[in-house]
Amino acid sequence: MVTPLGISTSECWANMVAGKSGIDWIRRFDVDGCLTRIGGQIPDRYFAEEAVVFQGSDLLDRVLPIRLSLYTAQQAMNDSHLEVAGIDREKAGVITGCGGSTFGDEMMLTEPGHQHEHCHEMINELAATVSREYGFRGPAFNVATACASGAFAICGGYDFIRRGGAVCIAIGIDTILLRSTIEGFNSLMALTEENEFPQRASKPFDRKRSGFVLSEGACAVVLEPYSAAKARGARIHALVSGYGCTSEAFNIIAPEPEGKQMARTMELAVSHAGLTPDAIGYISAHGTSTPHNDLAETRAIKLAFGDHARRLAVSSQKSMIGHSIGAAGAIEFGVTALSLYHQLLTPTINYQTPDPDCDLDYVPNEARGVSALRAAITNSFGFGGHNASIVLEAANNLP
């Protein structure tokens, strides 16, 4: 995992549990004249670290999304302790989730020292590069569903494993924190323009929320059959037990205001997992900090869970790291898995002014220890109306 709060999973997790913000003034490129001048940039030391990791490789000449995909894939494989030599590589796949709207020109715009001919990469190269690195000869492809891309990649990986796959690396990745992207989202009035105090700008579910903060990052997860992971004594962070996917079919940039399709997405996920709504104890919200999205998601949770919604803990990691678009669903999936593993919920920071219409328990400002948290949902709702909810269960509940 690489986010504005760190370049490793353990660092990102520790900083989220501490309620830190990774949002700051943008310094990597010129934002003079932009309405929004803040963002969630991955730490500069990532670039020094990747130079060591990829030393002697032509990977350093590839665009940042490819390098970041492989970097986080290696993190996930190291964490899994899977020996590549022992994997049936005919049954091993790679699925990436990346919107890629500016993929071709990212290196030219943000890394001017590189040659122009390296700028124009195909978006499917994200999965293809990781597949080649490990010799995985199962499916390798990219999913582009905007802000839900990372979550859809994990859903695809789940299906692949259920159909007999041995291993799948699922990656959410986006590095579209660029001037052109900021100007585009400003034209949609989607970004906050509160530049004075960057760390306070992203405030999901708060009455004074005014838009999301654009960021960048990546997260890779290794999916494999539970029986195989248990047999080799793997450290299992969580079990993926079901998912739901729907389309809003409403508006390309806004959700249906009552949250009906969001609610249906969560209901499908719970049903697919074979659980009842009251088995869910925590929701990692999409929680973008936009007025319309946070209200629709709150309404959706109430529709899907009824009276149980009042007993749910709900929090948004975007309050700390901003919105990393295609990476967001995978990062939040990873954090939810860690929440189940450690029985510890990350907070929604910057929650200061309650909104009477967003009136659930948003785990405000401080992490919360829990006991016997059995199951959780992570939500991803993308521009274009792409919805995904994934149910995870604590692995220690399983035989």
Image: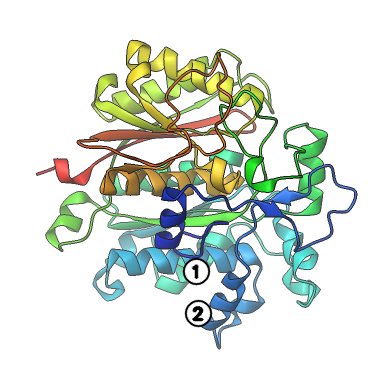
Position in image of residue 191 (x %, y %): 73, 37
In the rendered image, is residue 139 in sight? no
- In the image, 61: left or right of 232? right
In the rendered image, is residue 218 in sight? yes
Crowding around mark 1 (Cα neighbors within 10 Å: few <14, some 14 to 19, many 20+) is many
Q: Which residue is outermost to the bottom?
A: 56
Corner quadrant of residue 366: top left
Identify the mark at residue 53; answer none if there is no mark: 2
- Label 1, secondary structure: give it: helix
73 w.r.t. 333: above or below: below
- Amino acid under label 2? Val
Residue holding disc 1: 71
- Amino acid under label 1? Tyr
Dot 2 and dot 1 residues touching (CB under 8 Å): yes
Corner quadrant of residue 204: top right
Residue at figure coordinates x 55%, y 46% from the top left: 320
- Label 2, secondary structure: give it: helix
- In the image, 345: left or right of 210? left
Marked residue nearer the N-terminal end (2 or 1): 2
